[in-house]
Amino acid sequence: MPVFKSLCCSLFVGVFLSCNITMAQEIETANTPLKKGRQYNEKQAYQELIQSYSIAADKGDISKMYILGFFYDSGIGVKQDYQQAMQWYLKAADKGNAKAMNNIGFLYLQGNGVKQNYRQAMQWYLKAADKNNPPSMYSIGYLYKYGLGVQQDYQQAMYWYLMAANKGNIDAMKAVGYQYMFGLGVKEDHEQAIQWYEKAQKLREEQNAQQ
C-alpha cells in the first residue's frame, strides 16, 4: 500500500506540474490580433488596439469590455491596473459576461485592486457558475475545500470540482483526483484518483498538440 500511494502521489505531481497554462492561453488569445502588426512598433500596435477596443466597448461590445479588463488585469500593452481591470470587468459582467464575473471573483479572492473578500469572491463565482463557467465552478470547490468565506466542506468541494471536471476543466480533474486520493468528501479510492489524474494529463497533452 505505501508503494501504491507513492506511485499515486508521483503521478499527481507530474500531472499538476503539466497543467498550469490557462493564463498563458488567455494571453495568447489576447495577443492574436497583434501578430499581423509585427512590421511596426509593438507599443504603437497595442495603443491602437486598445483604442479600437475602447471605442467598440463604449458602443456596447461586451467581449471588448472583458478583453480590456484582461489587458489591465495582466498588464498587456498597458500598465497593470487592477482597479481599471475591475471597472471593465464590472461593465462586462453587468451585460452577462461569465468570464468577467469569474475574473471579478479572482480579484476579490486575491485582493487585487479591492479589499480581499472571500464572500464576495464566492458570490461572483456563483454568478459565473450559473452561466455555465467551468473555471468558476472549480474556484467554488476551492473555496469550500479550504473554508474561505464559507464553512469548510469537502463534500461541497467535491460536488463543484466534479461539475467543472465533467465540463473539461483540467484543474478540477486534478482536484477530483486529489479528493479521491486522500478521501476528502468521498471514500478514499486510489484507482479513481489515478483515472482522474490520467484524464487530466491526457487532455492537457491533446491541447498541447493542437497549439
Image (cartoon, helix red, strand yellow):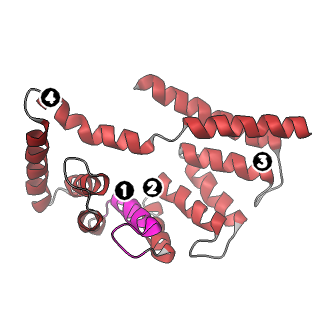
Answer with mark 2 or mark 4, whichever residue precedes in sequence: 4
Residue 207, image x, y percentages = 47, 30
Residue 60, image x, y percentages = 15, 60
The residue that disc 3 covers is 181
Judge left or right: residue 106 versus residue 188.
left
Residue 168, image x, y percentages = 53, 42
Q: Amino acid at mark 1?
A: Lys
- Verify whether residue 161 appears in magenta: no
Q: Give me the C-alpha separation between circle 2 and circle 4.
A: 31 Å
The residue under the point 69% across, 69% down is 153
Q: For the view shown, which residue lies furthest in the top direction? A: 209
Give the secondary structure at mark 1. helix
Whether pointer 2 and pointer 4 mark residues with C-beta atoms closer than 8 Å, the reply is: no
Whether pointer 2 and pointer 1 mark residues with C-beta atoms closer than 8 Å, the reply is: yes
Does 198 sit above or below residue 171?
above
Q: Amino acid at mark 4?
A: Lys
Judge left or right: residue 52 versus residue 161.
left
The residue under the point 25% across, 52% down is 71
Q: Give me the C-alpha separation between circle 2 and circle 1.
A: 7 Å
Q: Give me the C-alpha separation between circle 4 and circle 1.
A: 26 Å
The residue that disc 1 covers is 99
The residue that disc 2 covers is 133
Answer with mark 4 or mark 1, whichever residue precedes in sequence: 4
Q: Give me the C-alpha separation between circle 3 and circle 2.
A: 26 Å
Q: Amino acid at mark 3?
A: Met
Answer with mark 4 or mark 3, whichever residue precedes in sequence: 4
Answer with mark 3 or mark 1, whichever residue precedes in sequence: 1
